Image (tube, grey):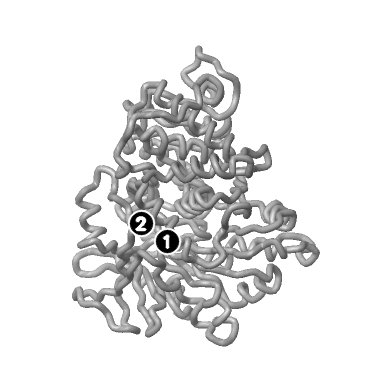
Amino acid sequence: MFIHEMIEFNAREYGDNTAIRSLNGAMSYAEFDQHCNRLANGLVARGLKPGSRIALLSKNNLNYLQLVFACMKAGMTIVPMNYRLAPAELNYILDDSEAEMLIVGDAELREAADRCADISSLTQRYTMEGDLDPAEDTISWAAFDTLFSDDANRPPRPSEQNVIQMYTSGTTGYPKGVLIGHEQLLNAFVMTSHIPERCQVGHLGIMPLPLFHVAGLAASVVWLCSGATVDVMDDFNPVQLVESIASSSSCDTVLVPAMIQAILAFVPDLDKYDFSPLKRITYGASPISLPILEKAIAVFNCDFVQGFGMTELSCMVLCLQAADHRRALKGEAQLLRSCGRPLPGAELKVVKDNGEEAAPGETGELLIRSATTMTGYWKLPEKTAETIVDGWLHTGDAGYVDEEGFFYIRDRVKDMIVSGGENIYPAEVENALFGHPAIQDVAVIAVPDKKFGEAALAICVLKPDTSTNDEELIAFCRDHLAGYKTPRQYAFVDELPRNPSGKVLKRVLREPYWEDAERQVG
């Protein structure tokens, strides 16, 4: 079975229902499916074959999800790219993915794309803005949307095909392409259907998360497969979000805790809005504090659900249900520190350093076995084999399971920093800082941050007879890294603590900053 067949079913059964909408317009399911067919035929007509990679650099818009499903229909693989990345980072993804086509969302992003070096595999470039000009190597979306038929008949292809290649940074400093197929997305649809009151036909799902993140893309795909309307916000705007909620008849939304805090802090006259249409807020990427949850429930008066997942798992696999949140508010506040319990189709276990499964309360690494687990890392079979062992995916998160099966994170086996829902890998930042002429040694660690949960702190050792400061290092990093990866805090020391084999003791560096915290993550 193919995931796009569910869209074709909805187009037949609920053709007049709105599939997607944004500030720039709306599209029914019949129109959405028709446009996806045109795009798929256009991709084939441009010489692309099943398995071809198509890179997409765009903010959320009406065209984004059309292209995702068009690639599915054409048997091709979409490579969503984070538009906040620096040109060097985009360049690496384009080269590594062997993308044959790049589609850019707007003129501003085209500037960033044009700064990427020539990629041997990349032979075609398109923009979602502007008029068709065959004289240019970059032509417009109109070339697909008006010049090709909406015929849905295409040659058969294997359902095992990978449909998404989503890049996630790694501890080596180089992003890895996570491969997600039809099977993983279909299983995500089935798995999340067991969450009570899921968004269904006629309901509205408001999506402020970027679609280049697995949480935003997977939730949007599930909503569309369910027959709901997806409201794609081009960027998170707290006022716009609450107005969309208040003006709907029934809706869900997906947020990170920092977004919830922003709504509570920055929307004027919040108490004057009618939030009765809002049925549920699903949040993830980091836990929510009890004071923020209590305030949010008082304001929104809806269900709260926490999802735990990662790009390698395609969607959420652990869930802290609405009923669990209600238990927390009635005196079991410790549940809010949990990531929840497995959804159907997922299993978890906690393994100690010696490989033995940990007893309840014992700390070890979280392993997940799920029907949604990636098919592997693109061109990295050894890394895939290290990450997935006997069907169990090693998450890199350390924690414990309680007697009821709730999982609690205590620390990370790896050094990843989660800041405002964005993953920051210290090795990536360290590699960039080592390029600064004054830096002799550097270690990047997570420190507590009231707004984002965690923030990156760069602890630097300077070369003899050199000097620098925070402002200079921030400016340097901005030329090499996405803004959200650039540390805003720096400390300068004479040397970094290392073990006998020379490895930096990051736990020692973190201790002074986390000594008053209950756990070593934000």
Could you say which is closer to the camera, residue 121 or residue 34?
Answer: 34
Q: Position of residue 330 (x, y in %)?
A: 59, 85
Could you say which is closer to the camera, residue 349 or residue 33?
Answer: 33
The secondary structure type at the circle numbered 1 is helix
Depicted 260 relative to depicted 484: above or below: below
34 sits left or right of 395 in the view: right
Q: Which mark is residue 372?
A: 2
Could you say which is closer to the camera, residue 90 or residue 142?
Answer: 142
Q: Residue at x 59, y 44 (%)?
A: 14
Which residue is under mark 1? 191
Depicted 233 relative to depicted 507: above or below: above
413 sits left or right of 138 in the view: left
73 sits left or right of 357 in the view: right
Q: Residue at x 32, y 53 (%)?
A: 374
The secondary structure type at the circle numbered 2 is loop
Answer whether labels 1 and 2 touch (C-beta < 8 Å): yes
Q: Residue at x 40, y 64 (%)?
A: 317
Q: Is residue 430 visible?
A: yes
- Which numbered disc flags the more N-terminal residue, 1 or 2? 1
Classify residue 199 by image quadrant.
bottom right
Could you say which is closer to the camera, residue 11 or residue 109?
Answer: 11
Q: Position of residue 356 (x, y in %)?
A: 21, 77
Q: Residue at x 44, y 70 (%)?
A: 521
Q: Position of residue 276 (x, y in %)?
A: 72, 65
Report the amino acid beneath label 1. Answer: Met
